[in-house]
Amino acid sequence: MKSKVTTWLIIWLLVLTGKGIQAQDDPESLFLTSNRAYTEGRYQEAVEGYLKILDQKIESGEVFFNLGNAYYKLGQIGPALLYYEKARKYLEGDPGLEQNIELAQLKIVDEIEEIPKIFFEIWWLKLTHMVSIHTMLWFTLGCFTLFIALIITLMLKNYRILYRLVWTVSVAFVLLFIITAGQIYEFETSRFGIILAQKVSVQSEPGLSATEVFILHEGTRVKVNREFNDWLEITIADGKTGWMPAASLGTI
């Protein structure tokens, strides 16, 4: 479990939110209090504390991760996986997070055979999920800054070695830009969710009177295609599609 949130991060988030928060509702204090509740086995209290932090419009990979852990201890697999997946956006590749996701997924009732992916799809997914989108943005920005600095230096001092260095950095920047663009595109266009209800009937069309297509259980991950009133059209890993009540799904 993530045990600390640095003071500077909390202060920065408070500045961004622009809210005056009472001492007992201070995010750092809430985080530490919730961590203490978790370690002492008061998991429901820990959940309530972490949710109070999120209610202040503050998002943190550590908070999502710890909230997922608390829900897991309470035996609520759906919310646990939901917040683990939210944490992934900030802690992509974190070994502890990935291990906890695997453990939670073992408790999922539904056994869905995923549609096989071609080699390029597998390679691209691994490439774009090595690190979080936030980290990749910093890498890309740093590489671009270095590229500009080298160009300026080359204009001032015509060193041959700089030509090769500029070429190398420019190639690295293009590759990083492509990966980052892919991550941003996926983030903007793909919407996923986790089933929160213990059991939900997926219908052929929006409405309780429609034909039941299949049944899903808590913790299953689905892709959201579109929304109509209080219903969502979803697709599961094997390609099956149907409609389910929006209230039974937590959006990642």
Image (cartoon, rainbow, N blue to C red):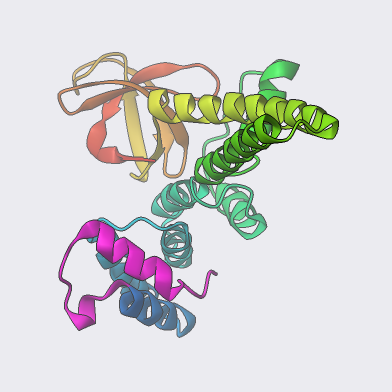
In this view, the residue farthest toward the right is 161
Nearer the observer, 24 or 209: 24
Q: Is residue 211 left or right of residue 186?
A: left
Give the residue drawn at x 47%, y 38%.
Answer: 220
Range drawn in magenta: 1-27
**In the image, is residue 247 above or below residue 63?**
above
Give the residue drawn at x 36%, y 73%.
Answer: 46
Q: Give x and y (percent) for residue 140.
A: 58, 37
**In the image, is residue 119 above or below residue 145?**
above
Q: Give x and y (percent) for residue 238.
A: 55, 20
Rendered image quadrant of residue 161? top right
Q: Give x and y (percent) for residue 42.
A: 39, 80
Q: Give x and y (percent) for residue 1.
A: 55, 69
Nearer the observer, 209 or 74: 74
Give the residue drawn at x 25%, y 33%.
Answer: 246
Q: Is residue 25 left or right of residue 160?
A: left
Q: Quadrant of the C terminus?
A: top left
Nearer the observer, 99 or 135: 135
Is residue 90 visible to us here? Answer: yes
Rendered image quadrant of residue 136? top right
Residue 252 belongs to the span the image colors magenta: no
Q: Is residue 112 left or right of residue 185?
A: right
Residue 18 belongs to the span the image colors magenta: yes
Rendered image quadrant of residue 50? bottom left
Is residue 117 visible to us here? Answer: no
Q: Is residue 2 left or right of residue 83?
A: right
Nearer the observer, 154 or 205: 154
**In the image, is residue 79 above or below residue 167?**
below
